[in-house]
Image (tube, rainbow, N blue to C red):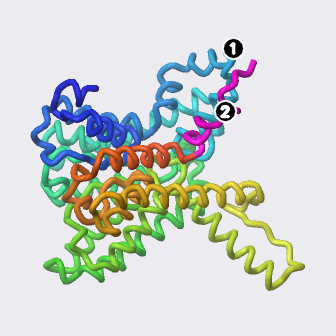
């Protein structure tokens, strides 16, 4: 409504798309001139990222703990609310940091706010204007990617770009790691298998892309700088850009599409299918292969030394199957628009994984304004599916979930 009533975005569908993109921390935009917006709406755009990053439900529990308590006395039931929080919270475990869910939400938000303020301070030290430092930090924290300048992050100094890249990476780390560090369990935090894989993918793809695009820059250090920023932005599904990676070789496009799908760590504000799911699928495939070769050998799938139940592996496989089907349906709908396969495919992948920019006209220096209203609504649904990790949206349309319990 703020976008629509102000008439700064005259089309309600466009205003809806922009707000869904903000709250789901996607960063896809229909705006062709961001700097034409009033400062109030520019701030509102970035603030939706910040709220959506940690989750509206978790925000409610952090600010109004009584909401959780009262749910136990209503027809919804505390257990039902906990399941909703698990869907909205950027992590696989809710209520495990401390006994009470509300206290866990508060701890998560303290870490979230602390990292946001720290980034603002670093950006101010680099000479970034205060308004830009706040709005960019809000977008980084939510791994959203709404730019406040038409030139994007390229409008700022190298120092500021490095700061933003580092904080994008930090917000893509499981927040449970920060909790362990704050409580003195540093050794346990550093043993996180998912974190090792996350940083391994980050640094490996940065090196490969830097080598592949070195001819586009003056020297290897500049290539590494922009490659690291782009990889950090894409794997954390933030969507900020310092260069138009749409002009890079096709090889890098495939790597970036891979990073869009993988996303950040579970328990982070990043989107994508999450590193942990990729690990479970990979280990599950290897386990099946070994079972075929040695059918009498009993070996379980483990993460961080703990056995993963078969039901968890099954749920991950079902999730990925639904993910592929919904992506295919969205791709078919977008094919009705006069856009190339790369544009439609990358748009679906970018929106369902909450990344933002795709390729072609929907790339880092483009926008989604040329799409039809049907395509915009389709991608809006994709953004919601990706942010809430599919299941809660599907549950809304299941009659068995409509009946009250009590």
Residue 272 at x, y = what percent?
47, 56
Residue 282 at x, y = what percent?
63, 70
Looking at the rendered image, the disc whose residue lies closer to the viewer, 2 or 1, is 2
Is disc 1 surrounded by few (<14), some (14 to 19) or many (20+) residues within 10 Å?
few
Q: Is 387 or 399 nearer to us in this picture?
A: 399
Q: Is residue 376 magenta?
A: no
Is disc 2 surrounded by few (<14), some (14 to 19) or many (20+) residues within 10 Å?
few
Q: Secondary structure at mark 2?
A: helix
Q: Is residue 405 magenta?
A: yes
Start and end of the magenta stretch?
A: 391-406
Q: Is residue 220 above or below residue 109?
A: below
Is 88 on the left-hand or right-hand side of 93? left
User: Could you tell me if the residues under marks 2 and 1 are in contact, i.e. CB atoms within 8 Å?
Assistant: no
Q: Is residue 50 above or below residue 173?
A: above
Q: Is 398 or 315 nearer to us in this picture?
A: 398
Which quarter shows the C terminus?
A: top right
Q: Identify the disc placed on residue 228.
A: none
Residue under pointer 1: 73
Q: Residue furthest right?
A: 296
Q: Is 320 or 333 nearer to us in this picture?
A: 333
Residue in the picture at 83% in, 83% down: 294
> Does the image show residue 169?
no
Residue 25 at x, y = what percent?
38, 44
Is 34 on the left-hand or right-hand side of 113? left
Residue in the picture at 44% in, 49% down: 382
Residue under pointer 2: 399
Q: Is residue 59 above or below residue 324?
A: above
Residue 242 at x, y = what percent?
20, 61
Q: Earlier in the sequence, mark 2 or mark 1?
A: 1
Q: Secondary structure at mark 1?
A: loop
Which quarter shows the N terminus?
A: top left
């Amino acid at each position: 409504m703020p976008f629509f009533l102000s008439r700064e975005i005259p089309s309600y569908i466009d205003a809806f798309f922009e707000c869904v993109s903000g709250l789901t921390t996607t960063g896809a935009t229909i705006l062709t001139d961001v700097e034409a917006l009033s400062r109030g709406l520019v701030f509102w755009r970035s603030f939706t990222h910040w709220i959506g990053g940690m989750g509206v439900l978790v925000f409610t529990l952090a600010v109004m703990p009584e909401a959780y308590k009262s749910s136990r006395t209503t027809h919804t039931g505390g257990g039902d609310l906990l399941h909703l929080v698990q869907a909205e919270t950027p992590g696989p475990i809710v209520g495990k940091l401390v006994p009470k869910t509300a206290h866990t939400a508060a701890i998560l938000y303290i870490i979230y706010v602390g990292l946001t303020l720290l980034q603002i301070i670093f950006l101010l030290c680099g000479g970034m204007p205060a308004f830009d430092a706040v709005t960019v930090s809000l977008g980084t924290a939510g791994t959203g990617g709404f730019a406040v300048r038409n030139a994007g992050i390229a409008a700022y100094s190298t120092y500021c770009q490095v700061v933003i890249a580092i904080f994008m990476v930090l917000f893509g780390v499981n927040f449970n790691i920060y909790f362990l560090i704050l409580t003195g369990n540093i050794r346990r935090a550093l043993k996180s298998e998912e974190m090792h894989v996350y940083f391994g993918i980050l640094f490996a793809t940065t090196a490969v892309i830097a080598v592949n695009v070195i001819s586009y820059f003056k020297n290897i250090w500049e290539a590494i700088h922009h490659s690291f920023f782009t990889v950090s932005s894409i794997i954390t599904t933030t969507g900020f850009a310092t260069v138009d990676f749409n002009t890079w070789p096709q090889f890098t496009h495939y790597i970036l599409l891979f990073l869009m799908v993988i996303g950040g760590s579970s328990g982070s504000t990043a989107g994508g299918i999450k590193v942990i799911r990729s690990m479970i699928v990979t280990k599950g495939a290897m386990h099946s292969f070994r079972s075929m070769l040695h059918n009498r050998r009993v070996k379980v799938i483990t993460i961080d030394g703990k056995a993963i139940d078969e039901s968890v592996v099954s749920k991950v496989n079902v999730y990925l199957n639904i993910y592929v089907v919904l992506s295919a349906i969205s791709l078919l709908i977008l094919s009705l628009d006069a856009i190339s396969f790369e544009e439609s495919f990358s748009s679906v992948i970018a929106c369902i994984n909450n990344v933002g920019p795709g390729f072609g006209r929907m790339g880092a220096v483009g926008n989604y304004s040329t799409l039809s209203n049907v395509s915009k609504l389709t991608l809006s649904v994709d953004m919601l599916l990706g942010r809430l990790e599919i299941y809660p949206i599907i549950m809304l349309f299941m009659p068995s979930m409509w009946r009250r319990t009590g």
